[in-house]
Each structure stands twice: as structure tokens, then as C-alpha cells.
């Protein structure tokens, strides 16, 4: 949870769709994911070949 899901545009001029994974519905961190997109829309997604998962940065304490 907290990672970004980026659906890349499939045609020239189509923008990428970016959302935050708010719930993992599969087992052991696998899809499907519940995703909240920038426009507030939520949906269930199983990433395909045109999708990228950008892991949030984790920091370690001192």
C-alpha cells in the first residue's frame, strides 16, 4: 500500500494515469489492487504490460 500505479498512455497524446494503491486484494502483495487515482476515482486494477508500479521510498531510522 502507498505505492503508485502508473498506467501509461496507449496512443500518442494520451497522458499517463497515476494512482495510489490503497488496498492490496491479492495474496502476498499480489494484484488485484484497489487504486485511488488523482481525480478521486477509485477502481480495482490488475496491472498489465502498459502499467508500472513505482514503489514509495522507504527510509531507515538512525
Image (cartoon, rainbow, N blue to C red):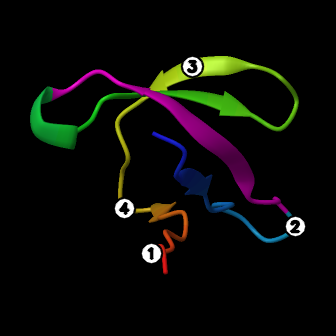
On the rendered structure, is 29 left or right of 56? left
Q: Residue furthest left?
A: 27
Q: Position of residue 38 (x, y in %)?
A: 83, 38
Sequence order check, earlier mark of 2 and 3: 2
Between discs 4 and 2, the one toward the N terminus: 2
Badge 1: few (under 14), some or many (20 or more) residues near its Cα, within 10 Å?
few
The residue that label 4 is drawn on is 49
Give the secondary structure at mark 4: loop
Distance CA(mark 1)–CA(mark 4): 32 Å
Residue hosting label 1: 60
Q: CA distance from mark 4 to mark 3?
A: 18 Å
Kindly indicate whether the residue at mark 4 contacts the one at mark 1 (C-beta within 8 angstroms).
Answer: no
> Gap between marks 2 and 3, in whole Å?
23 Å
For the N terminus, the image quarter is top left
Left or right: 37 in relation to 38: left
Numbered badge on residue 43: 3
Q: In the image, is residue 50 part of the stretch drawn in magenta?
A: no
Closer-to-camera residue (61/31): 61
Q: Is 24 inside the magenta-drawn segment?
A: yes
Query: Which label lies toward us, 1 or 4?
Result: 1
Q: What's drawn in magenta, residue-wise? A: 14-26
Q: Main secondary structure of the magenta part?
A: strand
Q: Is residue 29 left or right of residue 52?
A: left
What residue do we see at 63% from left, 61% from top? 10
Q: Which residue is mark 2?
A: 13
Residue 15 in the image: x percent, y percent? Answer: 82, 60
Helix, strand or loop at disc 3? strand
User: In the displayed structure, would residue 62 be above or below residue 26?
Assistant: below
Residue drawn at x 57%, y 19% as measured from the top left: 43
Q: Mark 4 or 3, which is nearer the eye?
A: 3
In the image, residue 54 sits, relative to residue 46, either above or below, namely: below
Categorize mark 4 by other alpha carbons within 10 Å: few (<14), some (14-19), many (20+): few
Amino acid at each position: 500500500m502507498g505505492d503508485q500505479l502508473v498506467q501509461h498512455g496507449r496512443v500518442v497524446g494520451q497522458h499517463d494515469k497515476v494512482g495510489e494503491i490503497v488496498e492490496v486484494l491479492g495474496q502476498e502483495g499480489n494484484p488485484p489492487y484497489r487504486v485511488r487515482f488523482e481525480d478521486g476515482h477509485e477502481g480495482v486494477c490488475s496491472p498489465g504490460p502498459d502499467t508500472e508500479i513505482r514503489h514509495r521510498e522507504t527510509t531507515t531510522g538512525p
